Image (cartoon, helix red, strand yellow):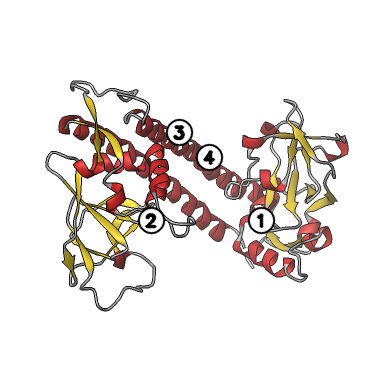
Amino acid sequence: MNKGWEQHKLGETLTGFEYGLNTPATDYDGINKYLRITDIDDVSHKFDISHLTSPKLKDDNYLLANGDILFARTGASVGKSYRYSNIDGKVYYAGFLIKAHIKDHFSTNFIFDTTLLPRYHYFVQVTSMRSGQPGINAKEYQKYIIYTPSESEQNKISDLILTIQKLIDLQQRKLEQLKLLEKAHQQKLFPNSFQEKPLLRILHGDNSWWNSYIGEVFTERVDKGSSEKLLSVSITDGVYPFDESKRKNNSSDDKHNYKKVFQNDIAYNSMRLWQGALGVSKYEGIVSPAYTVLKPLPNQNSIFYEFMFKNIDMLHIFQRNSQGLTSDTWNLKFNQLQHIKIKTTNLNSQNKIAKLLIKIEELKNNESNYYHNLMTLKKYLLQKLFI
């Protein structure tokens, strides 16, 4: 053990371990907040205020204060923890949570951070499964073993973790705003079925739009291949080489019936187009016969149509036109796809819209990478600064 660190049971650092308020939630009254297990964010462990409620019955014995830490005691989220902060306001805690209060000479933030360690998750996994229903009671929580340095050292460590967490929170808000910006532009740069023109217009263009069909801007590519690079398509990654995925290769050894894909083609999963499983290919290769490959006709920008097809309005249209008895069997082949009505514009405007949306997407991806780097840094510090 590191010099100056001491072993403690959690019950030696916290006092109370009291069960929460047993009353149903009601509409939020603007002052009194009710914290339930589902209100604790799975990633940040903060109070998710997107669906605020108030307790039907209010008892100030169940109000949270500085120095309080909550633990989920039952269900799928058993072990989830939360640290109260003044910024959360007047908060009552619900019955499936256990409240404990920090003792003197211990740091609330440091003790809370020990609940983010892999060792804590192992403790939760082992302890909660001793009975059929996952759960950890107050006495069991108190037996969790932690290691602590001096109080001043605890504060230094927890201050560093808290600083990283503040950066993560800020980055998460930026990322959420960029996602909203991207969604708004995708909706406003393309007209829906009730609009003649989009809500946003591109500068220095004629902004003319007209009715068309998908079959008038794309044709189906039916070329067969067998020895080319195997490609796959997903909702999040679009078209990518299959060997870059972690999935097991279940493709047939005989690939003579596989479909060729060329650069700038759009490939899509015929059974999941309505979920957005499509993308413009940067590669030449082949895809499974389960996929459909669209070849752009002259003077068409495939990336423009990729953004159009991923628009929520278009996904609903794809869903309505998919054939099959249940969502598990829905599919949309080119024979049906080609007859779907769209509104399109000239190549110059297509290029400008695609360029703008690509810029927003690149900015979002860069900010997302920074967010994940911060999360990795926090995980690394938790592993290195704690025993």
User: Helix, strand, or loop for circle 4?
Assistant: helix
Quadrant holding the C terminus:
bottom right
Q: Quadrant of residue 223?
A: bottom left
Q: Which residue is mark 3?
A: 177
Q: Which residue is mark 1?
A: 115
- Mark 3 or mark 2, which has the lower sequence index? 3
Tell which of 153 and 67 is nearer to you: 67
Q: Amino acid at mark 4?
A: Asp
Which is more foreground, mark 3 or mark 1? 3
Q: Which mark is residue 331?
A: 2
- Mark 4 or mark 3, which has the lower sequence index? 4
Name the residue rendered at 69%, 66% in the picture.
123
Which is more foreground, mark 4 or mark 3? 3
Q: Position of residue 74 (x, y in %)?
A: 75, 57
- Mark 3 or mark 1, which has the lower sequence index? 1
User: Which residue is at the far bottom?
Assistant: 253
Q: Amino acid at mark 1?
A: Thr
Q: Position of residue 167 (x, y in %)?
A: 50, 40
| In contact (CB < 8 Å): disc 3 and disc 1 | no
| In contact (CB < 8 Å): disc 3 and disc 2 | no
Give me the C-alpha separation between circle 3 and circle 2.
34 Å
Which is more foreground, mark 2 or mark 4? 2
- Mark 1 or mark 4, which has the lower sequence index? 1
Q: Residues within 10 Å of mark 3 (few under 14, many from 20)?
A: few
Q: Which mark is residue 199?
A: none
